[in-house]
Amino acid sequence: MVFPHRLELGQNTDAALAALPTQRGVFAIYGSTPEAEPYISHTANLRRRLQRLLGAEDGGTKRLNLRQRAVRLEYAATGSALESLLLLYRAHRDPRQRLKLRPPPLLRCAIENAYPRVYVTTRLSLKAAQHFYGPFASRVQAESYLESVLDLFLLRRCQPDLAPDPAFPGCIYSEMHKCLAPCFKGCSDDRYRIETEAVCAFLDSRGESLKQQYGDGRDAASAALDFERAAELHAKFERARAAAHLAPELARPVSQIHAVIVERSAADQDAEESVTLYLFTRMRFFGPVPFSTFGMRHGNEQSTSSSLFVQPVQLAPVPLDEPAELGRQTERTSVGTTLSLDQRLGSAVQTLLNSAEAASQASSAVAMDHLALLRRWFYRPESQRTGEIFFAASASEPDAQLSPAAFPLRRMLRGISRVVTGQSASQATALQSESLPAT
């Protein structure tokens, strides 16, 4: 079992339950029959929930009580909903059924087809993972984004495999000039291939490829005093930006999702002095790795300056009273050996990257499960948002070359400060916008 704490139930059950922590956690209750599946669940208060399940029976209530059937209890205190979710996934024999994990909607560019198309799917192929994009919160969101992207290009939208025939009359999209019409050879194969590459580049760059193309053309036309052409390209630029804006931050090539998640820690009673880091890469979770914030002065998000009140800093150690020469020597030694916050965070991220590098490639089923877990955490309701996620700056960087320098360490330190102080990123942004002078 993945739960670290174990408790044999017997005559001292009530005293043992009273000593349980009152924080969030997950637990498993085992019966006397070895082959029976344990009762596994999570709770926001371990002591209160387990006292209800394993406390003295009350004949006047219909609440579930397992005191007469339970012989052993295993539990783990957690600091966040993500930690509880990952522990439950590892503990259940059938986590997909128990946790009700639904395959997340993805966009797939069927590049292996003679005439590729993009469509919404919930099936992942590891061989073509670089051509899957997502995950999305819902199928409706994925279809809405796909429709807005296809409106910018001339890629086909029909489903069957094509056998081009010049006698074929075409469809409504070819009549509206929204498709290159490869079904009746309305274009050459090379022209359709170029259009396919443009669509894939848009999805890979989250719209930046087309925005840069239209933006550069607009600026060149404006410099040449061709204002009509500049206005036309500006309208196309706005359409491309509106389509790209429909994609959530998480929607990107699934094989290139490299992100570090910062969540609250459950280490003993010092949760306010530490956080937990998780890494999502190679389509699965790795971690957790603890990161201590002891001695860290947290930034003031309400300040609009670039001073130390904005960026978290590490408090310098104060030496004890000692001779001046010895004190200077101790100071030089401590300065030479003490790691900065950036270095400590980089070391923690490197630990996660090392564990990812040593792990084997996940199967398509496991990858879809972890994408479903990531989707459930990322698209959770606003009232449940506690942690923060930080993506690698270079999403196209291979896994083998991924390093801590690819992650925004300074922004991550500010995020760690917000997680520790209980302030969300949206609240910090709102406070900063309120403090800015009106223009």
Image: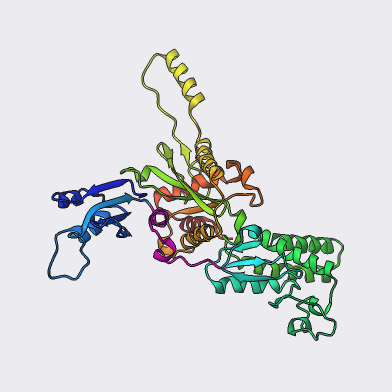
Q: Is residue 259 left or right of residue 217?
A: left
Kindly indicate the quadrant of the structure image that contains residue 386: bottom left
User: Could you tell me which residue is drawn at 54 percent across and 53 percent down?
Assistant: 362
120 versus 348 height, above or below: below
Instruction: Tell me the colour scheme of the image.
Output: rainbow
Kindly indicate the quadrant of the structure image that contains residue 272: top left
Question: Which range of residues does the magenta coloring cover?
Answer: 80-105
Q: 108 or 379: nearer the eye?
A: 108
User: Could you tell me which residue is drawn at 50 percent across and 44 percent down?
Assistant: 413
226 versus 5 height, above or below: below
15 versus 98 height, above or below: above
Q: Is residue 117 left or right of residue 439?
A: right
User: Could you tell me which residue is drawn at 52 percent across and 53 percent down?
Assistant: 284
Q: Position of residue 124 (x, y in %)?
A: 59, 63
Kindly indicate the quadrant of the structure image that contains residue 109: bottom right
Q: Position of residue 411 (x, y in %)?
A: 54, 47
Residue 179 appearing in the image:
yes
Q: Is residue 192 left or right of residue 285?
A: right
Split into 4 quadrants, where in the image is the C terminus?
bottom right
Q: Is residue 85 magenta?
A: yes
Q: How many marks?
A: 0
Residue 306 appearing in the image:
no
Q: Position of residue 237 (x, y in %)?
A: 73, 67
Q: Is residue 145 magenta?
A: no
Q: Is residue 261 left or right of residue 91?
A: right
Q: Position of residue 324 (x, y in %)?
A: 42, 14
